[in-house]
Image (spheres, coloured by chain):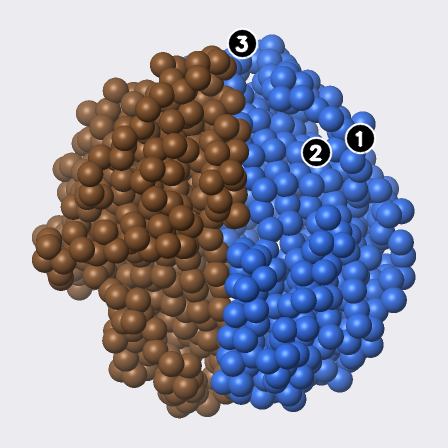
Amino acid sequence: MGDMEMDGQDNKGLVRFFESRFGTHEGLLEDVMGPAVSKSVDDADLYFEYTTARTLSLEEGIVKKGGLHVSQGVGARVISGEKTGYAMTEEVRPETLKDIVRTARAISLDSASGGVVRISGSPLRTHSLYPVGEEELDVPVPEKKDLLVEADRIARSVDPRISQVMVSVSTEMKHIMVVRKDGHLAVDRLPLIRVNVTVIAEEKGQRQTGSYGYGGRIPFSEVTGDKVAHAAREAARQAIVNLSARPCPTGTMPVVLGPGWPGILLHEAIGHGLEGDFNRKGTSAFSGRIGERVASPLCTIVDDGTLSYRRGSLNVDDEGTPTQRTVLIENGILKGYLQDRLNARLMGMSPTGNGRRESYAHVPMPRMTNTVMLAGESDPEEIIRSLEKGLYAVNFGGGQVDITSGKFVFSTSEAYWVEDGKIQYPVRGATLIGNGPDVLTRVTMVGSDLALDPGVGTCGKDGQSVPVGVGLPTLRIEELTVGGTA
Amino acid sequence: MKDEFLGLLDFVVERAAHYGATASEALFLSSDDLSVAVRKGEVEKVHRTRSRGIGLRVFNGRSQALISTGDLARESLDRLAREAVALARETAPDPFNGLPGTPGTPGADWKSFGILEDLTELSQDERIRLALEAERAAFGEDSRIRNSEGAEFQTTVSHRALVNSEGFSGTYGRSLYGVSCSVIAQDGDSMERDYWYEQSHTFKGLPHPEEVGRHAAKRALSRLHPKRPRTVTCPVLFDPETARSLVSHLVGALSGYALYRNATYLKGREGTDVASPLLTIREDPWLYGGFGSRPFDGEGISTAPKALVERGVLKTFLFDSYSGRKLGRPSTGNAVRSLGDVPQVGVSNILVASGESSKESLIKAVGTGLYVTELIGFGVNTVNGDYSRGAFGFWIENGEISGPVTELTIAGNLDSIYKGITGVGNDLKIRGSLASPSILVHEMRVGGA
């Protein structure tokens, strides 16, 4: 990781990046932001973004598609009390900047004529969680092609029943600059890489899919032959396992979740319900419950935006607030919410660095970063052996939650029926449903094997997608409803 | 405006040819969106977004590459056209790649679709008033409506233009007005949220915001004090909203891409029964006021109405040029194209033919079982037909609704679900690009307490 001096240089470099691209010198920014200021305006910001993304994908052994995507724009936001005015433009010029600030400003109904904004010194960045240079993010297309072709070969070599292999690699570099009405200036450069392998296995007219991916805010040097091969083998293994899957039993039963990606449970059951907006409005099943027991004393859950190189991590959030590690649940007691600036101010709390947005075209909201349950003391093998009759689920597809009633779902993509502590057979995909505020009160064992997910999670809220992470040790829950067909 | 963006597309296609592309296709999208949101009687958000972008697909013989950008300066577009051609030299050739080959001649004049009107000049105050009316009506419905996620009034005008090096050039636009309202009913320690929305291409066609608010309130109230059903196998009645999602999986399984990848449970089933004879599904790209109406598809191929499923029999899979060529089939005019990706298979308006049963007679026909009004989660696999989702709704006992239920799952296999349809309602309403009446499935596995 780079030292602070280097980071300072880097920050100035990012400011210059936007200056040369959009002409956003300090004088212009102060000029543009001035009219956003008045007594009735509580907060205002400009968010500049420039993102370049490249994708390459393979199907049927051929690298069929290459893509390059550039998106750029700026969003202006003015907040007065609980009101937000927002406008954006993709043509960044002094006139359009003034125009979007004027449009956003119309929300505060006073007619005061504006004030003075002074950009305060050099931009600060307290973390350097993913020091990946532009030149470290990508490699020439022929090199990437070789990796994809090799992944295809390896997946097919796992088993002759693998009939289709699709591989893709995407690299993205996002540059952001946030200018706030208090003169605070924040910049960041966010790398993001994702490798994905999906396979289809067929046997006697039966078809199953397997999928595995990994990634994060990492340099391309992490996209090695070994790691891509592992992804290919893992996708193939899942599809082959599922070929022999039997119908999943149905009803309320004990469930053991494997480590890593099954942490999507935390994201759906707990995380969304603790986002500041729902709690300020009193519409979450967790509203007004800070200090109450919502989980077994074995459970401590944090949202941590400061994990190095992780997909859900951020140096600063999209409002310029440095990210942090926020304790949500400590030994079963509800401790805190995830906040952006608007909701923190209205609730008399501090922002937690969770104000995120998909792009310049979107308003920030409280969102998760990496949501993790800390390790417990049980031996994971022991946890599986403890299951008399129940489900052991190790891989999942997506999940969803109804914030107000607290009901959440997540769907298995690899799960096994267990009897007398022994795995019996794999079961077909089933949706699990539970109630967020009490599901974790039924946790009776927490493993010592905390693992973070491989780095492919994307969270959707109000039509906005952002990259997130989860982490979970092996976990035993006494009662969860399993939506099987048997 | 129109000439300006067609001119830009011509420029991009010309630049691609200049740098050596053997063929190319350029797409322009723009949208202008204004939404106002209110909550508890106060303005909460005014959001204005105007965005536009260009997506360029270039071919170097049978190799292709794609670029997209929101930076429409000519010098930037010129640079990207050059990069796209360079990238197309590095991807591998695929004999099935290429433009459609037959320039489309529009089969219908989109101006007769009723999908674009000059946005009635609505002032900000008027927009706010409409949103406030929806929320006020919800709060006025019952004193147990105690909280709100707010109400929103939104207008969007979007334009799409497509030009390719084979001489196709086309454009169409769409206007959309929408009202939505989401409120919370509270009674004792029971708290339930529900919402409702309406949309229309014309301001006149939009139902009154008060109706939207009242309906949202009624839905939330009806969910208070839910019980958990027992785990049981029983009939399941899908209301029109959830029936739409049920039918969408069948349509998804018809994609030509899924077909050539052997990734659909419907492979090899054309001309055979894939559903109960009660189920007929048509695609109508020319539907007047249809939310998916379009004169040409994502590759410029003219659209036309067709049957997908006729009395349970699968009539056709859906192809764009690429997936069609892979299987020796003509395109069915089902390419959809976004800025950031090459064409995929998709649909315009999907209509499930109305049946004869009233909602009441369908509830009677259930006897004892589930009436589903909301589904959550992603537990649907069209590769093998596995279906398992979280559900909310009402329990039906002896042909009558006995009360709300929650925290349950419904599961089955798509093939047996569609074949097990024993009732189709007479309550078809066009509320989105996919429209279905209520659908009764005679048996599914319900997971509960």
Please indicate whether residue B104 sits to the left or right of residue A410 in the image: right
State the residue position of label 1. B205
State the residue position of label 3. B143
Instruction: Provide residue A9's location: percent of width, then percent of height.
Output: 18, 55
Instruction: Provide residue B296's location: percent of width, then percent of height.
Output: 79, 61
- Residue B90 shows in the view: yes
C-alpha separation, residue under disc 3 versus residue under disc 2? 30 Å
Q: Same chain, marks 1 and 3? A: yes
Spot the blue chain and give its letter.
Answer: B
Please indicate whether residue B145 sits to the left or right of residue B197 in the image: left
Residue at 73% across, 26% down? B121
Q: Residues within 10 Å of mark 3 (few under 14, many from 20)?
A: few
Colour applied to chain A: brown
Tag 3 and tag 2, C-beta contact below 8 Å: no
Q: Is residue A48 positioned above or below B395 on the image?
A: below
| Callout 2 amino acid | Tyr
The image quarter containing residue A405 is: top left
Residue at 64% across, 87% down? B61
| Callout 3 amino acid | Ser
